[in-house]
Image (tube, grey):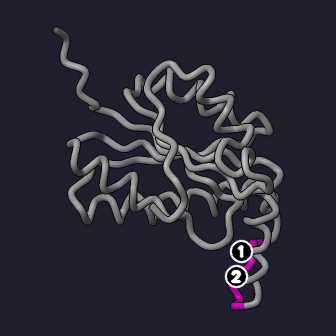
């Protein structure tokens, strides 16, 4: 019998949702399992729109983008800041975590590729806030990840 312990988890961070992503469920699971937590986000068009909204709010507080900084670079910087906040929360609970983001319109493919590159034992993903019963619980990203994942996948309900 082989030991199938979960040593490394990949948690997808959805930048397109309103507010800061809540990955409490992933942090708690990683802590319980003693697993390393890899936070991974993909900046696609919906994420870009959400991050621009954050940028506009920051600009209203006098924290706008420096002259000469590209929009994409600004969005990546925002994503890194969001990820660092989650990494810090995980560390406060004794969880080893790191995070990074990429810019792509191919979200499921990027998640699957990252799972392979990072040699993860579990992918944790939440359904997106799409409309419709099946889309809500098995949005296209979740369905594609479930269909082709190289490891176990946990679909976490929002607010869990």
Which part of the image, by quadrant, shows the C terminus? bottom left
Whole-percent x, y for residue 47 in the image: 74, 56
- The residue wearing badge 2 is 58
Is residue 61 positioned above or below 50 on the image? below
Q: Nearer the viewer, residue 46 or 66?
A: 46
Residue for badge 1: 54
User: Which SS type dominates the magenta stretch?
Assistant: loop
Q: Decide: marks 1, 2 in contact (CB < 8 A)?
A: yes
Q: Which residues are magenta?
A: 61-66
Residue 118, located in which quarter of the rendered image? top left
State the separation of the CA atoms marked 1 and 2.
6 Å
- The image shows residue 4 at horizontal and vertical percentages of 25, 21
The quadrant the N terminus occupies is top left
Q: Looking at the picture, tell me which residue is in the foreground, 2 or 19.
A: 2
Badge 1 element: helix
At which x and y percent is residue 31?
24, 51
Point 41% across, 32% down: residue: 122
Q: Residues within 10 Å of mark 1 (few under 14, many from 20)?
A: some
Residue 141's spot in the image, x, y percent? 69, 38
Residue at 62% x, 73% y is: 19
Q: Residue at x 63, y 22 (%)?
A: 147
Depth-wise, is mark 1 or mark 2 nearer the camera?
1
- Magenta segment includes 47: no
137 relative to 34 in the view: left or right: right
Task: Residue at the far top: name it.
Answer: 1
């Amino acid at each position: 019998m082989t030991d199938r312990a979960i040593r490394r988890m990949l948690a997808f961070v959805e930048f397109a949702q309103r507010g800061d992503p809540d990955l409490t469920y992933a942090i708690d699971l990683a802590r319980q399992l003693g697993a390393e937590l890899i936070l991974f986000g993909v900046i696609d068009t919906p994420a870009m729109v959400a991050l621009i909204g954050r940028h506009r709010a920051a600009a209203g507080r006098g924290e706008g983008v420096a002259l000469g900084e590209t929009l994409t670079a600004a969005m990546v910087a925002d994503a890194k800041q969001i990820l660092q906040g989650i990494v810090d929360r995980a560390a406060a609970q004794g969880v080893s975590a790191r995070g990074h983001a990429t810019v792509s319109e191919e979200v499921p493919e990027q998640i699957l590729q990252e799972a392979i590159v990072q040699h993860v034992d579990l992918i944790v993903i939440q359904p997106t806030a799409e409309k419709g019963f099946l889309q809500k619980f098995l949005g296209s990203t979740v369905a594609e990840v479930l269909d082709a994942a190289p490891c176990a996948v946990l679909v976490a309900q929002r607010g869990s």
